[in-house]
């Protein structure tokens, strides 16, 4: 998504949700038994919305992962110059939701058949990926991918990457909770991009 595809970005005031006031670390303090998981599914605004609907998720932060440049900016990432993917950091309570459930939510909110793109957004910065942090997460991610493949639901291969997590860089504040703070612009983008329509075609009605 470039600035033209996200109308009014320049005019957006830099508002911050209280839970994000001191960065990702504050979300961990909100739940002493919390854990983190990392995913990429195209537009991070949309992935925030998807994961924040999952019971047991404490917070979701938009950011960048999987690249080679330290402290990347949105402009650099969206131009495809850093190797990062638009990603989300999901902080969750393992006593209320499992990593397996997060994987299920992930798959049903991405197009796993298209490499280096999601819906109307094209380029490796919009690739879908599971960034695993432990061997157990890797095992569960591989099993979830294999289950989809073995179901024969799709005639073409799963292109979603399963790769080790690297440094997560929090995106600029005007991208955090965008779907809540700018609901009309967000809905215009989401439906104009064809995301909801494609997800229903792939996975059925949610």
Image: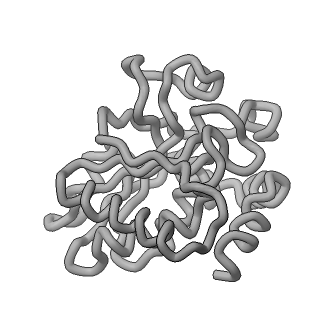
Q: Is residue 189 above or below residue 1?
A: below
Q: Position of residue 148 (x, y in %)?
A: 49, 70
Q: Nearer the viewer, residue 191 or 80?
A: 80
Identified at 46% across, 22% down, the residue is: 72
- Residue at the spot 35% in from the left edge and 42% down from the top edge: 163
Residue 47, percent from left and from top: 55, 57
* Vertical side of 64 occupied by 113: above or below: below
Residue drawn at x 15%, y 67% as measured from the top left:
33
What quarter of the picture does the N terminus occupy? top right
Residue 2 location, quadrant: top right
> Which quadrant holds the C terminus?
bottom right
| Display coloring | one colour
Q: Nearer the viewer, residue 2 or 196?
A: 196
Left or right of 147 in this view: 110? right
Q: Is residue 154 left or right of residue 194?
A: left
Quadrant assignment, res 4: top right
Percent x, y of residue 158: 54, 55
Q: Residue 190: percent from the left, percent from the top? A: 75, 57
């Amino acid at each position: 998504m470039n600035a033209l595809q996200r109308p009014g970005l320049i005019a957006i005031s830099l508002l911050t949700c209280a839970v994000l006031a001191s960065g990702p670390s504050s979300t961990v303090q909100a739940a002493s038994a919390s854990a983190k998981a990392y995913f990429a599914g195209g537009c991070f605004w949309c992935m925030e919305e998807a994961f924040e609907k999952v019971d047991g998720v404490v917070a979701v932060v938009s950011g960048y992962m999987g690249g080679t440049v330290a402290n990347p900016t949105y402009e650099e990432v969206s131009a495809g110059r850093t190797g990062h993917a638009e990603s989300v950091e999901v902080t969750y309570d393992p006593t209320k939701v499992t990593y397996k459930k997060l994987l299920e939510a992930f798959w049903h909110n991405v197009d796993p058949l298209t490499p280096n793109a999601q819906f109307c957004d094209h380029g490796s910065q919009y690739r879908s990926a599971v960034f695993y942090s432990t061997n157990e997460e890797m095992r569960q991610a591989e099993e979830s991918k294999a289950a989809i493949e073995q179901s024969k639901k799709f005639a073409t291969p799963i292109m979603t990457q399963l790769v080790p997590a690297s440094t997560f860089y929090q995106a600029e504040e005007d991208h955090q909770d965008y779907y809540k703070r700018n609901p009309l612009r967000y809905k215009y983008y989401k439906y104009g991009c064809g995301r909801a329509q494609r997800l229903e075609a792939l996975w059925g009605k949610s």
